[in-house]
Amino acid sequence: MDRRAFLRVGGAAAVASLSGCLGGLSIGGLSEDDFDVGMSANAFLPEVYEIERGETVVWGNNGSRGHTVSAYESAIPEAAAYFASGGHENLEAAREAWSARGSGNIPPGGTYEHTFSVPGRYDYLCIPHESKGMVGAIVVEE
Ligand SMILES: [Cu+2]
């Protein structure tokens, strides 16, 4: 088994166990089939999610409070575009817009998606719950 195959299997297992945890739980009509990365009270699940270049990741808020998906611009590939729910240009702008008007909020039952065309690792956070350790990473394989 090559490394990529192993990683893909690991990702599938993580999704399967996530589904198990959420059995029967559906908020705002969002089922686990609707997203790749879930958002619980203080966590992105799975915390590290692996995809192939060009794939789109869908985050789904299956918890009961609002979250953001906001990249750390210093922890994404150099050639990659910045991304954040709310469409902000960088993390500082995303933080300011969140505190000023809740911009970038993904409400319970809401989704956010981003397509990754540059391989590498992308670290991101939820602005209101970063201090509780709500961070995650997308790893884009070549
Ligand atoms: Cu959050």
Image (tube, rainbow, N blue to C red):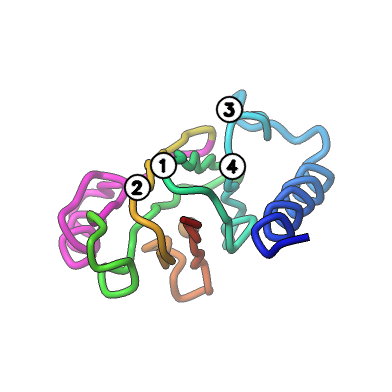
Q: Name the residue under label 4.
A: 36
Mark pair 2, 4: CA separation? 17 Å
Whether pointer 2 and pointer 3 mark residues with C-beta atoms closer than 8 Å, the reply is: no
Comparing 90 with 3, the one in front is: 3
Comparing 97 with 90, the one in front is: 90
Q: N-terminal of the two: label 2 or label 4?
A: 4
Q: SS of the residue at dot 4?
A: loop
Q: SS of the residue at dot 3?
A: loop
Q: Is mark 3 within 8 Å of ligand 1?
A: no
Left or right of 92, for residue 85: right
Residue 21 to residue 141: above or below = above
Disc 4 residue type (three-letter): Asp
Image location (x, y in percent) of residue 71: 33, 61
Mark pair 1, 4: CA separation? 15 Å
Q: N-terminal of the two: label 1 or label 2?
A: 1
At horizontal 49% and vertical 64% (from top left) the residue drawn is 137
Whether pointer 3 and pointer 4 mark residues with C-beta atoms closer than 8 Å, the reply is: no
Q: Mark 3 points at which residue?
A: 28
Q: Mark 2 points at which residue?
A: 117
Image location (x, y in percent) of residue 39: 57, 50
Residue 26 to residue 130: above or below = above
Q: Mark 1 points at which residue?
A: 54
Image location (x, y in percent) of residue 48: 58, 63
Comparing 103 with 77, the one in front is: 77
Q: SS of the residue at dot 1?
A: loop
At horizontal 77% and vertical 42% (from top left) the residue drawn is 19
Q: Start and end of the magenta stretch?
A: 82-108
Mark pair 3, 4: CA separation? 17 Å
Q: Where on the picture, by quarter, is residue 2?
A: bottom right
